[in-house]
Structure formats: structure tokens, C-alpha cells
Image: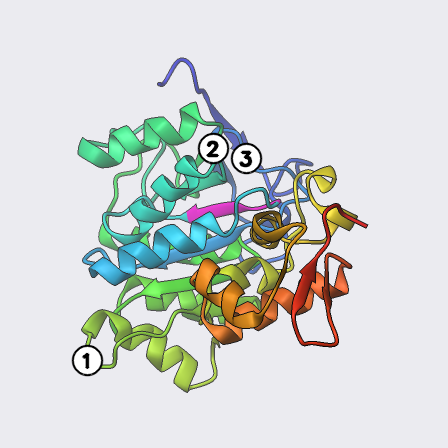
Amino acid sequence: MNEKYPIIKIEPKQANYPYWLSTSTQNKHTIYVRGQLFPTDYRPIAMVGTRTPSWNGNALAKELVASLKNCKTSVISGLAHGIDSQCHEAALKNQVHTVAVLAQGLDMPIGGPRGRLAGQILEQGGALVSPFPLGSKAFKHKFLIRNHFIAALACATVIVESRESGGSMHTAAHCLEEGRLLLATPGDILRKTAQGPNLLVESQSALALWQCDNLPIFAELEFISQDSSPSGAVAAQQLDFWNNFAGECLSIEEIAQRSQKNLPHLLSILSELEIQGLVEQTPQKNYSFNKTPP
């Protein structure tokens, strides 16, 4: 890995210094990069959470990242066990660019599953990033700095699952400090790892992510290939939804039964498809799906 992916030192005044980092309070730091950073027109999203997630937390991480497929974005996380690793792995699976921010020098060894995941990130065109010079070991205080860098590299941060205190909540605080968008996924009030997101939403510090498909909308993401969606504006998930019903005229009940989506989410999708001219509501209150894009 060392020979194939050399470490590059990037100074703040260099043209390839990441845009979102350059507009943050951390913009005086030299960074070290192994692999490929995201293109300058991407809007990267930080996604972090507890090292001991619930089944629901793992599922949320996977679905949130899947919603970013075909978007101009990168998943920024910390390569830690738990939610961080789930987000990186989901990014690799969905071919979404991903960056792991480390609390150590990039020349220092990464053991076990984290090391293997780091190698996969590089092999699939992602990057490892560190604000620490070569030879730096991962001491506790460096994780606090790492957490700030995760938020500073991204246009928005998502707290997937977290206790009321800990690294993820530090990242949330840094996101607010940078004036960036903060999102959180509310959870069961009895689950300790849902207390952090619930607190952020209740205090109105973060927007609640009730639907995973809303993430690209809230983050104002563009699509990698405008030719792959009608009018270049329909989300990939909405396009897939339309393809399933193209040429049919159905009642809302029939659509709900076949799509297995709840009514509020379904109405939101249909409304967007109507705006794009892919669906029309008939006088009988049915929905007519066009056979081809307008």
C-alpha cells in the first residue's frame, strides 16, 4: 500500500487544498493525503456515530449512504469501529467516494479490520487524510482534533447514532461552530445510543432526518451524470421509483401496496415527479405515470 499510494503533503495555499477545509477555522493546517481526494465541485458529507451501534444504527448508516449513490459527494468519516466503518463500507458498496480522517501520521500502521478497510478505500479511489505529520502516533487528544477536521472537510455532518457525549457529539459541535448544516437521525428514547441525535433535534441544533432519501435534498447535492435522470433534476431514487410504474395509471393505495412506502414519503415522491412532468394526477385522483421522460 505504501509504494502504490504515496503520501502527499498539501499546504493551505496550494490549489488542491480542499475547498471546505479552506473556508473553515482549520484552514491554516497542512494536511497529508494518501489516495485520491474528491473533485472540487463535490459537496462532501461527514457521517459519524458510536463505536457500539445498535442493529438499527448499522441499518441507518447503510441506507443513508445508499441514498448518496450517483451524487457528487464524498462520505467523510473516521475509520473507527462501529458507525464510521459501516459508513465507509456502505460507500464502497454503493460506489460513493469516501475519505477516512485519521488521528495519526499516515505512515503509521493500521492494524486489523481497520487496516483492511483503509486498503479497500484506497483501491476504490478514496483517500486517507491526516492533519498530523509523519511519525505521529494516535494519542487521545489527537482524536479531538481529528473530529474537528471531519466536520471541517464537509459541507454537512450527519450524526447517525451516539450517546449524549463522546466523539460524535464533539464533531456535531464543531459542525455548528463552522456554520455548516447539521443533521441527526432520531431514535428510540430508551436507547442510549439514540440520546445524542435526539438531544440535537430537540434543542433545534440539528435537522431531523426522518427519511434517508432526504439526505441528498437537505445537502443540496448534484448528480454525477445529468444524462442519467430526466431534466437532470430527479433524484436517482425517484427515477428508480418512476421506472417501476412507467406507463401505468394507479390509485394511491395500489402504489403504496406495491412500493411498500409510507403515505407521507410516497406523497413527497409523487409530488416531485409531478413537478418534473413524469406523473399526472387524473380527475379520478389516480396517478398516471408517463411512459417516457418529457
Q: Which residue is mark 1?
A: 190
State the quadrant of the N terminus: top left
User: Secondary structure beneath disc 2?
Assistant: loop
On the image, the x and y values in percent for residue 126 come to 47, 32
Whole-percent x and y of residue 187? 30, 74
Q: Out of 284 and 274, give the one closest to the viewer.
A: 284
Disc 1 element? loop
**For marks 2 and 1 on the same chain, the one whose residue lies earlier in the sequence:** 2
At x 36%, y 28%, the residue is 120
Direction from residue 59 to residue 35 in the image, left or right: right
| Helix, strand or loop for the magenta stretch, by majority | strand
Q: Amino acid at mark 3?
A: Leu
User: Which span is picked out in magenta?
Assistant: 72-76
**Residue ID for mark 3:** 37
Does residue 144 appear in the picture of this structure?
no
In the rendered view, tell whether residue 39 sits above or below residue 116. below
